[in-house]
């Protein structure tokens, strides 16, 4: 087994331990010392894998987002036309995010403030989102349901239109208003 393949389980173990601490205490109240103790590592060993608690947190957020978006994508019925697949994807994304935000309601406020943490994380989540929408748009163009002259511009527009779909928005805006907003966005699309 080479050096890199040994790193994968160790990094997963570190992320699992850190996730427990972040969920319990929040990002700002969790230290690298806490994480090292939780996963039975010496602090220098922890720094070998991650330069900071923020880098661990960012990786956890990206993993969570990837898993979340993948689960939503798997629910899309294959027989639908592309435009309905896009509507289904966005509606299901919202409905699942609604459930997810309720599951996370008990988390420390400080964790919510950092979720997602920083512009690079938001950009990575937008890339994941775009990667799921791209084939649906191409399918719609092939089916002659969607007229798309510039795929990347269209993807950017969709990402911007749905940028509000995040945990902070779920917490700030009442459910009835959120439902109406999502319905309107789907109508516009």
Image: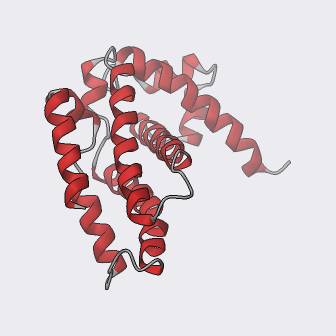
> Of residues 150 and 118, which is closer to you in this image?
150
Q: What is the basis of the colouring in this image?
A: secondary structure
Answer with left or right where residue 44 lies relative to residue 82: right
Q: What is the x, y in percent for residue 171?
A: 21, 27
> Of residues 32 and 176, which is closer to you in this image?
176
Q: Quadrant of residue 123?
A: bottom left
Q: What is the x, y in percent for residue 99?
A: 38, 26
Residue at image coords 53%, 51%: 77
Q: What is the x, y in percent for residue 71?
A: 53, 42
Q: Tag count in the figure?
A: 0
Residue at image coords 15%, 27%: 174
Q: From the viewer's perspective, is residue 165 above or below residue 126? A: above
Residue at image coords 40%, 58%: 84
Residue at image coords 69%, 43%: 7
Q: From the viewer's perspective, is residue 96 above or below residue 82? A: above
Q: What is the x, y in percent for residue 76?
A: 51, 50
Residue extending furthest right? Answer: 1
From the image, which quarter does the C terminus lie in? bottom left
């Amino acid at each position: 087994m080479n050096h890199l393949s040994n790193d994968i389980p160790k990094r997963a173990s570190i992320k699992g331990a850190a996730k427990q601490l972040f969920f319990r205490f929040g990002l700002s109240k969790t230290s690298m010392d806490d994480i090292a103790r939780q996963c039975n590592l010496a602090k220098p060993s922890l720094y070998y894998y991650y330069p900071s608690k923020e880098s661990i947190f960012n990786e956890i957020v990206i993993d969570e987002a990837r898993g979340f978006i993948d689960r939503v994508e798997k629910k899309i019925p294959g027989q639908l036309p592309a435009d309905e697949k896009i509507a289904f994807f966005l509606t299901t994304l919202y409905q699942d995010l609604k459930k997810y935000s309720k599951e996370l309601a008990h988390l420390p406020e400080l964790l919510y403030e950092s979720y997602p943490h920083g512009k690079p994380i938001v950009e990575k989540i937008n890339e994941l989102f775009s990667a799921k929408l791209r084939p649906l748009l191409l399918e719609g163009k092939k089916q002659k349901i969607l007229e798309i002259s510039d795929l990347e511009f269209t993807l950017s527009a969709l990402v911007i239109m749905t940028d509000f779909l995040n945990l902070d928005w779920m917490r700030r805006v009442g459910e009835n208003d959120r439902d109406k907003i999502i319905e309107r966005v789907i109508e516009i699309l």
